[in-house]
Amino acid sequence: MGVVNTGIKRRFRLLGQALRPPRPLTAAEAAEKSKAPRPPKRTQVVDYNIPIMPRQVESPVFVIAPVRSGSTLLRMLLNSHSRIRAAHELHLRTIGVQLTPGFSEQSMQELGLDQVELEHVLWDRILHLELLRSEKDIVVDKTPGNVFTWERLHYAWPKAKFLFLLRHPEAVVSSLENRKGNTATRAALGANALKYFKPLEQARRTLDGLTLRYEELTADPARVTREVCEYLGVEWEAGMLEYGEYDHGPFLPNLGDRSDTIKSGRIQPARTLEYTGATSPELAKYAVAWGYT
């Protein structure tokens, strides 16, 4: 009997260890993890063969924005609202499931599920957990990679809401250029930015949503956040503008901006463009389309 009890105690002890919060990464470990291959910057093409299942979160909010566009600032402002949970970048498109042919694949098909819809169910559960933990009722995901999967997000959540965050194309490239550790040429950075601009503009022209500009957000945050709150159906709260007074979690690699500007807890003016050369035709096209003339 004692042997059995010992085994039970051991199993419970191991289970307790598994449920403990993970140890925070050291700076060296975080740097090593940041070297891992990044998800491809291309729009996902998905075949939808199974009807969507009921969602626990019917109307999540997705920010569709390029990198270096101020989405972390927008996230901090929204997360400071008493009813809005705007988590760090969730990278939902990189979270998948694997079904074993002949076993789980067949089993799930009998339940009316396939790999794609199972992933949607998992993503939905992640969003729902954020609402449960925060005790709020609106959840926002601001991952820049959303630009590459906006069609899938719209399919998975027909009632989802979308915020399109724009920034002057040259300012995006300039911000990439000034990023710590950057060694890429300006031409390469421009090509990188364009990978985000094209699907962003496709989404903006296809979906209903609210378009915001980073420059206006920093110049008149009260007006812009009021517009966002109206779009989301919540009362505006002045405390949103004092985002530094709230806990938004740690600043970690690949989960959002970690600059001193965002860590200051204060809304600061957008930097003036430092680039004085001629704008490339590709960037100029989006500058015009987004009203930067």
Image: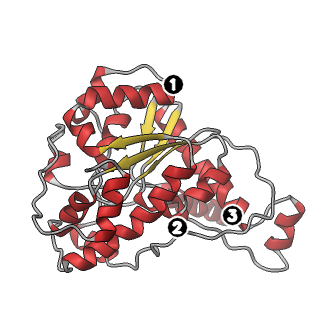
Give whichever of discs 1 and 2 has the lower sequence position. Answer: 2
Visible in this render: residue 106? yes
Residue 187 rendering spot, x and y as whole percentages = 24, 78
Q: Which mark is residue 94?
A: 2
Residue appearing at x 53%, y 69% in the figure: 43
The residue tagged 3 is: 4
Give whichever of discs 1 and 3 has the lower sequence position. Answer: 3
Quarter of the image for residue 23 reads: bottom left
The alpha-carbon separation of the residues under discs 3 and 2 comes to 42 Å
Q: Secondary structure beneath disc 1?
A: loop
The alpha-carbon separation of the residues under discs 1 and 2 comes to 30 Å
Residue nearer the viewer, 27 or 280 = 280
The alpha-carbon separation of the residues under discs 1 and 3 comes to 57 Å
Q: Secondary structure beneath disc 3?
A: helix
The residue tagged 1 is: 233
Mark 1 neighbour density, 10 Å: few (under 14) some (14–19) many (20 or more):
few
Quarter of the image for residue 284 reads: bottom left
Observer-side mark, 1 or 3, equals 1
At label 3, the amino acid type is Val
At label 1, the amino acid type is Gly
- Decide if residue 21 is on the left or right side of residue 245: right
